[in-house]
Image (cartoon, rainbow, N blue to C red):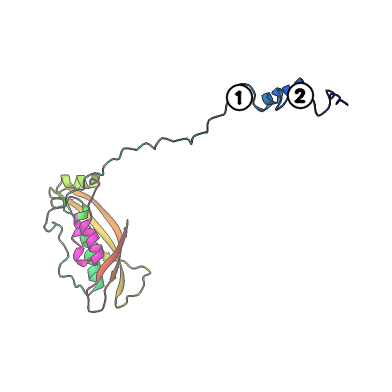
Amino acid sequence: MTNAPHPPWSSGHRSCCSLRHAGPRPDRLRQQQPQGHRRQPPRLPLRRPPPARMPTTPPPPALPKGKAGTPKGGLPKDVDAKDATAVAQAIAVANRTYDTDLDASPADAQRRTVQWLSDTLAKNVADAQSLSQPDAAWRTMAAHHGYTTVTAKRAYDDQQPDTATEAFRQFEVTVTTLGRDDWKGPTDTWVQWIHLTRTSSEQPWKADTMRVAK
C-alpha cells in the first residue's frame, strides 16, 4: 500500500509561498527602519569661550614723604605722658599742624604724632602712603608757602568715666591757614574724639583709636 502524497496545506509540505515568506516581512522591515533614516551623532557639550580679561590700571604712585623739621605753626612741647588730657590734646593739635614747605600731604603731620600712639596705630600711621594728589585747598596753601596754626579746646560730651587704664577725650579743634606772604586762608573747626589706653597706672597713655568730624 503506497503512501498518499501530502496535500499542499499539510505540515509535511511547504509551498514556494511559505518558503518565500520565511522571516520578517519586507513591509515590517520598512516600518522598523524607514528608508533614508540615519542615526543622529551624539551631542557634544557646548564649550563657552573664556571670559575676556579686562585691562587692569596700575595704582598711582604714592606721594613722597615730606621733609624733616618743625612746622612754622609749632608743635606741642613738654607733654606729660601720664596725663590723658595732655596726650590727647597734643595729638589733636599736631594732627592738623601743616607746613607746605615741609609736608607733601596731610599724612606728614599725622606722622608727627606717632610718639603718642599705640604700637599698632603708630605703625599704621608711619607706613601710610598717600595715593591721591593733594586737593585744591592744599595746592592753594602751598602756592602761598602756607602753614596752619591750631588750638584744641576741651569739649565735653556724654563720656565714660576714666579708669586706671582707659580714657576718652573730646576736643574742639580750630585750624587757621596762613601764608608766608601774609596771605590769610580759611579757618575751620573740627571735633576730634580720642580713645587712650595703657597697661598700668605707671605707664604712659597712648591713643589707639581716633575719629574726627567737621
Percent across and percent down for residue 80 are: 19, 73
Magenta stretch contains residue 113: yes
Residue depicted at x 34% and y 38%: 54
Magenta stretch contains residue 133: yes
Establish if 39 lies above or below 171: above
Residue placed under numbered mark 1 in the picture: 37
- The answer to whether residue 150 is visible is no
Percent across and percent down for residue 110 are: 21, 58
Three-letter amino acid code at disc 2?
Answer: Ser
On the picture, is 141 further left or further right than 158? left
- Residue 56 picture quarter: top left
Q: Quadrant of the C terminus?
A: bottom left
Using the image as rendered, state which of residue 25 and residue 125 is in the foreground: 25
Using the image as rendered, state which of residue 26 and residue 182 is in the foreground: 26
Q: Are marks 2 and 1 in contact (CB under 8 Å)?
A: no
Residue sitting at the far left: 69
Tell me the distance, in whole angstroms, between the alpha carbons under discs 2 and 1: 30 Å
Residue sitting at the far front: 1
Percent across and percent down for residue 75 are: 16, 62
Residue depicted at x 22% and y 63%: 122
Give the class, few, some or many, for how many residues have Cα within 10 Å of label 1's Cα (few <14, many ≥20). few
The magenta segment is 108-134
Q: Which mark is residue 18?
A: 2
